[in-house]
Structure formats: C-alpha cells, structure tokens
Amino acid sequence: MWVAADDLVLSFVRGRGPGGQNVNKVSSAAELRVPVGAIVGLTERGRARLARLAGSRLTIGDEIIFFSDEHRSQKRNREACIARLLDLLRTAAHEPRPRKKTKPSRGAVERRLTEKKRRGAQKQRRRGPEDA
C-alpha cells in the first residue's frame, strides 16, 4: 500500500507550550493531512480498520490528520508525522486471525470443581458451632 506524495498535504504552524523565544517565532510544528481515498492498496476491511484506528484523527471530510510538535526542527516533526502515518497503515493492513472458540478439557473442568469443593470444605471447617 502507498500514498502518492502529491496527496500528502503538509503544513507548518507554531508549536504550543513552553519553549521560549524559539517556539514563539519559529513555525516548526508539522501537520500532515492524508485523504483516505488517496491510500492505494487497502482492502475494504482494511479501510474500515483504518477508520476505526484513526479515531478522532479522522475528519468529516475523510482526511486523517497527524500533528507533531515534539521536536525543535521542521524536518524531525515532518518525519514523526510520516512515521505515525506508516505505523497506522501497517496496523490497518494487518488482518487479525479469527479467534477459534475452545472449551476447557474435561480434566481441567474436573480439577476446577475439585478445587472449588476443597476450598468450600476448608471454609466450612473454619466456621464455629452454630448458635441454634
């Protein structure tokens, strides 16, 4: 699966939070927007997983937004956004194996019930004589 470079919309804004003079005058925070329709090579089930995994990053206009302001340079913030996109796409493309229902073995059921009876009897012995 891949996304054409022309479909990636990358913009830089001023970062938030502390950082003093650098954060006040340098637009180093990166914002990456990717239209879901531009992602090539995902199955329909993969697209559904992508939408579920994207969560609040998915806009009404069917775009996924990634934001990074954790580094001081535009280059590293851009790389962080792209890394997050790739990680999300890899996760969405992975088809989870269906769970096979299993039952506990007869021996496991018997061991569990025997242990329950033993614990119940132990607690019963702890009780004092009843005041009739």
Image (tube, rainbow, N blue to C red):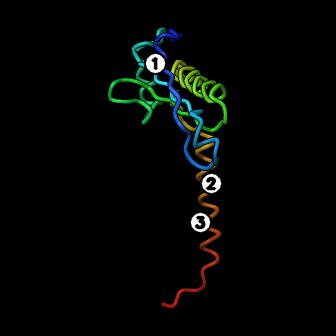
The residue at 63%/38% (across/down) is 70
The residue at 57%/38% (across/down) is 104
Q: Residues within 10 Å of mark 3 (few under 14, many from 20)?
A: few
Q: CA distance from mark 1 to mark 3?
A: 50 Å
In this orientation, does residue 17 appear? yes
The residue at 59%/73% (across/down) is 124
| Kind of residue indicated by mark 1 | Gly
| Residue for badge 1 | 46
For marks 1 and 2, the one nearer the N-term is 1
Circles 1 and 2: CB atoms closer than 8 Å: no
Residue that protrudes farthest toward the left in the picture: 60
Circles 1 and 3: CB atoms closer than 8 Å: no
For marks 3 and 2, the one nearer the N-term is 2
For marks 1 and 3, the one nearer the N-term is 1
Q: Nearer the viewer, residue 26 or 121?
A: 26
Q: CA distance from mark 1 to mark 2?
A: 46 Å
| Residue for badge 3 | 120
| Kind of residue indicated by mark 2 | Thr
- Mark 3: secondary structure: helix
- What is the x, y in percent for residue 114? 62, 54
| Residue for badge 2 | 114
Q: Nearer the viewer, residue 121 or 31?
A: 31
Q: Residues within 10 Å of mark 2 (few under 14, many from 20)?
A: few
Left or right for 50, reference 90: left
